[in-house]
Every structure is written in structure tokens, then in C-alpha cells.
Amino acid sequence: MTGSYSESSYSSAGSVSPREREQKTSKGFTDFCVKNIKSAEFGRREIEIAEQEMPGIMILRVKYAENKPLQSARIIGCTHITAQTAVLIETLITAGASVRWAACNIYSTQNEVAAALAEEGIPVFGWKGMSEDDFWWCIEKASNHQNWQANLILDNGGDATHYMKRKYIDKFRCLKGIVEESVTGVHRLYQMTKNNCLPIPAMNINDSVVKGKFDNLYCCREAVIDSLKKTTDIMFGGKQVLICGYGEVGKGCCSALRGMGAIAYVTEIDPICALQACMDGFKVIRVDDAIRIVDIVITATGNKNVIRREHMNKMKNGCIICNMGHTNSEIDVDSLRTPDLTWERVRSHVDHIVWPDGRRIVLIAEGRLANLTCSNVPSFVVSITACTQMLALIELFKAQPNKYKGDVYLLPKKMDEYVASLHLAGFEAQVTELSDDQCQYLGVARNGPFKPNYYR
Ligand SMILES: NC(=O)c1ccc[n+]([C@@H]2O[C@H](COP(=O)([O-])OP(=O)(O)OC[C@H]3O[C@@H](n4cnc5c(N)ncnc54)[C@H](O)[C@@H]3O)[C@@H](O)[C@H]2O)c1
């Protein structure tokens, strides 16, 4: 095959909703809903490219192909459907699992990748630009299928978890567990435990050391620049940027922007993170005090209504606003849908919101996660997260009946270290081995875990 994929090549898919169209794979499989099954071959190329940069998960694929630790696991997946998650999905299947998969975000699906998965006979439901209604329809399709009872959920944001719990509580109670990767989803799980309404165990992948250190920090450090450049062509040197939240994502964004010569300000609610921002050389201020002067506003808090209409009313003409946090609630986008403001779609995922006096702000991805909507995620970083997800699923699936109860757990430190070691090979890094007396001195085993669970 020559040439490259573009949506326009498949305009026959047209404007008819995928829900309205009957599609079949080359083998006659129909249990899926994607934008256009004909784009599967291009999606396969994307998946193969991702595999090249995902050493850890590919090592696990080879390792688990033989003993199939997930044999008879049935997993509902609700994640971004990208080339990288496709590598995870196919590794889970190689390890013996059967899966049903829905998109966790209405904009982030790589349509051709979803098609490639469907072509392999994987029930996958999601397409880029679907509506909220489509979104819940896809989760329903992934979670409810005759003669198929899930025993695990792999979630990103908690929507599949909450949907199952709300709609299919009996099936929910029978699950062996949930693996959750986002701050927002984890927060919702902890709220459930607080209210005594989490009947099954959940693994908090977001706070596993390798995920937090690499995915949230390094991924966002690279992606924030790419997303803003692709959507706005902005030059960062000398621009004033407000970053809301100095957690892992905020730290990544700040460090990248400073590297490009931007002047970064930080807002924080937590004195520890605020102090870190100060020590890293960023000015910590409140939104109200910076909003009139900044050229770019980036939210990275995992919180809601961090940037509200009252702030946007005061922004500079041309101010760019984007969200790097998980949900679409950090920027109060709904407050901009009033009759006095005009929305102009200037590019894919870029809206100009124009005030009556002609002043305009530039909203990226309607306040949804900017990097996953407008840019690509580095496969290497996703490989790290994918390994933690896979190990957590195996841990829950294989656990003795009373090992885990209805609570939220962290991945054992040893597994975190294992995931890191899977990724070191590509760097030709030589890790130092402890001598016996050093092991004794530190009180650790020669093969780890090298740090206590609380170490970050
Ligand atoms: N864009 C991506 O690719 C990507 C990757 C990983 C995580 N995320 C998402 O990004 C968000 C942040 O993740 P994180 O790992 O940095 O979490 P984190 O908890 O480490 O950091 C969030 C920070 O925001 C602060 N905060 C909360 N409310 C605030 C407010 N109103 N004003 C200012 N600061 C506030 C918190 O004190 C915290 O320090 C989450 O929603 C997460 O799901 C996005």
C-alpha cells in the first residue's frame, strides 16, 4: 500500500453517524462501531509504528504469550483509543483476555486505529468527534453484551466504572476489580470508599510512581508545546503564561514553556506545590492578579471551574486558553455560550470567542484535554503506563479471594520498579547491583524493592 491516510480519503463515511451505518470487517464481524472500517489498514501501520517505541509492553507481550495469565479475564476498557492503547489492548488479548472497548473521550479517538482493532475482531466503540450521547452509547455497548460478563474494568476517568455501578450493580459487584489511571477517576474512587460504596477492589495507577513521574510529567512536558504550536502557530519566546496547578502535569508544562523562553506564572491551592513552584523559580499568584496580562492560560488541576467567565471577561485580546487536565470542567466553557458572544470555528479544535467590543479569546479543543485532542502522545511514555495497567489487571485477576477488599490500592513498589527496568534496556543503561553488605546496610533485598512504598 502506498500513500497516507487522511480523513478526506474516506469521505464516503461522510456525515452519517457511525451509529446509523452498518459496517462489516473483511471477515464479516459486526460487533463494533467506528468511523470507517475501510481505514483499518492505515490504522494497522499506526499501531506498528507505536509498537516500535513501546519496548516495555512488547516485552510483556512476548512473556505472557506462553503462560497467558489473563486467560478467561473479560475486560471492559474505557480509555483513549489511540495507536498506543491499541498496543496494550492487543497485548491483553495475547495474554488471554477477551475485551470490549469504549472511548473515554469524545475527541481523542484515532479513527483508523479503532478501525484496525475492529478489523481484528475486537469489539471497539468510539470515533473522533462523537456527541455526549454517542459517548454513553459506546460505554453501554462495551459494558453490556449477551453471554459476556466482565470481570475487570480498565478505566480512564471513572465513567465506565460509574456507568456499570449505576446501571448494572449486580454485574458490578461480581467484578474482580477496577484499574484506574487518571487523577479524576481515582478521586472518584476514593470518594466511593469514603461513602462506603465501593464493593470491589480498585488499583490506583495514577499514583503509581512510574506513571506519575513519566506520563503526567514528561508526556505533558513535550505535548503542551506541540498542541499549542499545531493549533495556533504561536511563538513562545517572551510570552506570559499562566499555569493553573503545579502538580506533575503543571510542572511538565512549566518546564517546557520556560525552555521555550516563555515567562510562566503558577496558581496553586496547596502550599507544598506552591512552595515547589517558588523554589523552581516561578511566580505563584492568583488567577485574578494575572489574567489581564497573560497571553496563554493552561489549566492542569483536575479540578472544576478553575477558569470562569469572570476571568475570561478580563483576558487580553488574543489570549489562548487550553486545558491539560483530565476533564472538560476546568474551564467553564458553558459560561461562554451566551447570546452576547460569537463563536467562530477557525480551525479544527480552535474556536475564537468574540466579545461585543471585538476582543477575542482563542479556545483550544472546547476546553477538553488539549494534547490528546490536538497532538500525539509519545508512545514510550504510554508504554510505561500500559505496563502498570497490565500488571495491575493481572494482580487483581490472579489475587486470592480475600487478598483485596472494596478499597483503593497502589501498585506494589516492586512492580513499579519492574516496569521501569523493562524500559531501561533501550537506553543501554547499566544499573548498579548492590553488594551483600550494602543490602544489609540498607535493609533491602538484592533484587528490590529498593525503596519503601511511601517513597516518591
Ligand atoms: N494531558 C495529559 O496528557 C494528562 C496526563 C496525565 C494527567 N492528566 C490530568 O491532569 C490533571 C492534573 O494531573 P496531575 O498529575 O498534575 O495532578 P496533581 O494532583 O499532581 O496536580 C494537580 C494540582 O492542581 C492543584 N489544584 C487543584 N485545584 C486547584 C485550583 N483551583 N487552582 C490551582 N491549583 C489547583 C492541586 O493542588 C495539585 O497540586 C488531572 O486531571 C489528570 O487526570 C492529564
Image: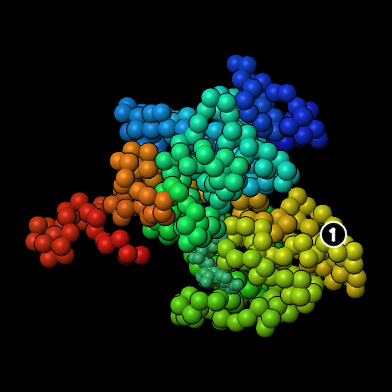
Percent x, y for residue 239? 66, 73
Can see residue 425? no
Q: Quadrant of the C terminus?
A: bottom left
Q: In the structure shown, which secondary structural element does the residue marked by tag 1 occupy?
A: strand
Instruction: Report whether 235 appears left or right of 412.
Output: right
Amino acid identity at mark 1: Trp
Query: Residue 189 or 265: which is nearer the viewer?
Result: 189
Q: Is residue 351 visible?
A: yes
> In the image, ligand 1 is in what quadrant?
bottom right
Residue 192, horizontal then vertical, whole percent: 50, 57
Residue at 53% from the left image edge and 54% from the top image edge: 185
Residue 200, compared with residue 343, is above or below; it is above
Q: Nearer the viewer, residue 291 or 18?
A: 18
**Count of residue discs:** 1
Q: Quadrant of residue 33?
A: top right
Residue 198 picture location, percent across and down:
47, 52
**Residue at horizontal 82%, vertical 54%?**
345
Q: Residue at x 38, y 28 (%)?
A: 71
Q: Looking at the rendering, in which quadrant would you find the N terminus? A: top right
Q: How is the image coloured?
A: rainbow
Residue positioned 66% across, 58% down in the render:
328
Quarter of the image for residue 354 reads bottom right
Task: Please name the residue that numbered disc 1 is placed on.
Answer: 343
Q: Position of residue 120 (x, y in %)?
A: 55, 24
Q: Residue furthest left?
A: 437
